[in-house]
Amino acid sequence: MFNLTLQDRVIGMGITMAAPLLLLCTLSSFLFLADAIKPRFFEPRIFDKEATGFGPIFEEEPLDTVYAEDSPEAKISMNCRVRANPPATIKWWHNNWEIKLMEQPDEHYSLVGGNLVITNPDKGKHAGKYVCVAKNIYGTVISKEAIVKFGFLDQFPTDEREAVYIKEGQGAVLLCTPPTRYPTDVMYRWIYNDFPNFIIPDQRRFVSQTTGNLYIAKVEVSDIGNYSCFVSSPSIGKSVFSTPIPLVPQIEKEVKRYPADIRVRFPKTYALVGQNVTLECFALGNPLPHVRWRKLDADLPPNYEVSMNGALLHLINVQYEDEGSYECEALNVRGMDWYRQWLYVEGAPEWAEHINDTEKDVGSELTLSCTAVGKPLPWIRWLKDGYSYGKGELKFSSLTFEDSGMYQCVAENNWGTIYANAELRVVSCAPTFIYNPVKRTLLGAKNGRVVIECKPRAAPKPRFIWKRGSQLLTNSSRMFIWDDGSLEILNVTKNDEGSYTCYAENDRGKDNSTGILSITEATEIIDGPSDVEVSVGGSAVLPCSASYDSSLDITFIWSVDSYVINFATDFKHYEKRMNQVNRGDLLIKDIQITHAGQYICTAQTIVDNATAVVNVFVKGRPGPPGWVRVEEVRDTSVKLVWNLGSDHGSPLIQHVIQTRDFYALDPEDWKTAVTSPVFLDGKTETAEVTDLYPWMEYEFRAYAINELGAGESSLHSLKIKTWDAIPAMSPTDVHGYVGVNGELIVTWTPMKPQYFFGKKFGYVVMFKTYEEKEWHWSTVADPEARRFVYRDRLIPNTEIEVKVKGYNSKGEGPFSLTTVLFSSDSAPSEAPLDVYARQVTSTEALVWWLPVYQVPPHWVDGYQIRYWRKYDDNEASASRVLVSSSVNKTRLENMRPDSHYLIEVRAYNGAGLGPPSEHCEMFTRRAPPNRRLRVYKYVSYDRKWLYIYWDHIYNYWNESYVEGYKILYRKEGERYGKVYTTGNHYFDLPMPETGDYVVEIRPRCEGGDGLISQIRVQGRGCLCCHSLSAASLLLLALAWMTVGL
């Protein structure tokens, strides 16, 4: 890779004259420069086992750098710090060419320590790849490549931008069109009229960090003004902004509603594992759309967060399993829009196995290998002393001193490059037992096996000879000399006692070491345990005693299924009984299913051991069935398959299937499913689940029953959606009446989403007069709609029939019951009686009356309720509420607190209003306090509990008395959560696992709820913990003392 000179590569020779017997280890062999005119000697490379030198090791390597073209510093510093003995020389390379500061001085380059400093950088000369090369007598290593790029951010064009005219209620998009730049990662904001008045994104306004465009979901009159796109580059510390774009809303007499229209769509995204990813999705529409996220065929990752009112989906610490198709759905009452795209998760190279410094004997074999993981899979290449040295594994059949050096394994893929550096040192040394002699005292059990190790330090590998006293030992049926020099003796007896000497010799020298072998009595189990069966909750004693040599100490070790029992930590269920010196019985208490298995008692001395094996069988409730899965899906049924779970010693009697659908209110809201066959015996592994809703997401799980009861439920299956079908239900509570202006108004109770049975659900409203044969009809596309208005005036004194049915993309469902109503030609002649009103809050009240019963032509289609303040309002400006004839009560809203009201009720039909009722008088309640709570929080040390408290609010004379407090605990970005009520001014909540949560607290009064105060909480996954100030802690302590905690 680098053009090192021949002199750099040739290793010189040093000569040391000394007697071989006086040397512990010899130096590596010498290399000569064969074609030199005169002999030249260089400093030798020392590859001795006692050498203290080592090759270069990087402690700091150069990093990628972005240099701002107009930076005032006018200097780039590339760092390189190396540890080596002897110290290494450092050189730098730029775009595969060596920077020769000595031979070719350059005014731009200078070397400070090992760091390269570039003064007055020039983009044409100094951009590119840089590497640091470190070298000493042990070898050469090169650093990771560092790329120098020049950053810039151009100015926006100065051309005047055209004004944008948009109707009130419509959505608008203001294009940023950012200038050319590097790096491309910038931050976008928008200036409204004057700097620094920046727009704060909310549910109505959104700034895309991908395109820079400003999106306004619904334009309002207050949006008029000038807008400028503001672009900031954090890496180079520069910002620019565009010329203003005038936005002119056009006022509409009647603001139209528009369906949700997704305009910000996240692209196909490639993310790096472990990083944070943000997906954008924003929709225009009126009313403002609500955005929801989901992942196809799986739940959203557990570490996701939603912000900007649903416009941003944050995936924290993304993992490979988070890869998949993500969908955002925007919905308002006018319609729905959706968009989906793929997120691919890939990974930079990481070492699964890498090389380490290695010392090997000359002439030995060696394989150097390293393995990297990543996505895509990295490819491997090798460098030796800075030169390319092959791919895959490096295999050496017979190492020589020339193979010594610095090796680098390089793993690369699209996301990066990593290096693993190691030194290979080939050594030569005469045998010596100074560091690892044969054990002086050796013990062996009678009739057992003895291994005497012989491991001298030597290179190359020595030859081994064993002697017992003066007797030469050779391989036999009882004795065997291993390849590593160890001596193995089988079936030892007292006759094998004595001294044993190991002799080691190679071409560098020889040495020996001696140990004395003694034989003891063997350890045996004399009272072992036998198999036992016990029920859950019971206990059992497993006996174990042994005979052993009296000169030794003995200990008893118990294990279960290869797990060694720790009696200090497992004392709740295990106890070892040592009633006698040679006994170690095991007591198992409060036995659970997990305690079943194979138990082994081991009687252990320092010489040998003996074991006894026993099986413990535990009878209990069944274990969970395995791998519940759906194999066939239909509209109202699925085929479910599972694997039998453990019966835990009692035969299975029955299986039960449970389901959970998309609209389950609680994660544990599981319902017993209807199956075919109805009864599933203990051997059944498949069943058909019936009576399901079409077009519904389901999860399934199963549990088994035996004579001891119902067992644990299985893990739930993957989510599936049943096929769609024609609606089978019809709307209920279909009513109708003719309005004051002669229009036909039809109302009904919307069908629940479970009964939609398919996509594109809506309603068909049909009506006709009694004499007509053909029905008039109209469709209502909103599945949540509950009324339809036919605005053509109807003929007075006419009987009208009305019916409603649902439809979806598969077809139309059944009609509701037909409702008959009348279009009258005379207004009602009677007034409602006994009008009574009761205050609910400071701004709301309930009013009742006795209904008016009349027959045509005075048919009653509904009631009009008017209410106004007796002394402060004009009766002509009274508030009005219309209800159908089937209702004799309603809620009055938007009233003034602490006021005296008059209420009037009149019946009406298509011909007009009837006479008014007598006025009902009532007083609204006083308003709740118009002040926010001061809220404090404290997180417990173990981050499991959140303690909150607040200052009590006292009411003024014109405010309602505070009766208590309401607490809403919800996830950030969601509207619903858990609601608590309390009469205290403190409360404790469990800390969430992950994600951001919001706690909302408001006073509860007879006049209604007060203003909301909020605090935000980060889940336990957050590493930091916010503590209270000393003053807050004092207040909290006083609060607890007050309530007697």
Image (cartoon, rainbow, N blue to C red):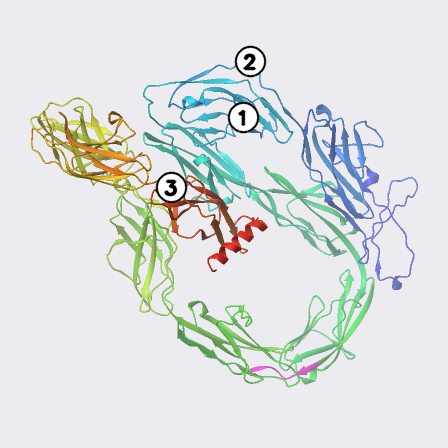
User: Circle 2 is placed at which residue position?
Assistant: 159
Across and down, in percent, residue 718 comes to: 38, 48
Q: Is residue 451 highlighted in magenta?
A: no
Q: Secondary structure at mark 3?
A: loop
Residue 5 circle label: none
User: Circle 1 is placed at which residue position?
Assistant: 197
Residue 592 in view (yes/no):
yes
> Cβ–Cβ below 8 Å for labels 1 and 3?
no
Residue 959 circle label: 3
Of tags 1 and 3, the one toward the viewer is: 3
Three-letter amino acid code at the position of disc 1: Asn
Which residue is found at the position 30% from the left and 29% from the top? 872
In whole angstroms, how far apart are the C-alphas of marks 1 and 3? Answer: 38 Å
Magenta range? 518-524
Q: Secondary structure at mark 1?
A: loop
445 above or below 128? below
Which residue is found at the position 54% from the left and 21% from the top? 194
Mark 3 or mark 2, which is nearer the start of the sequence? Answer: 2
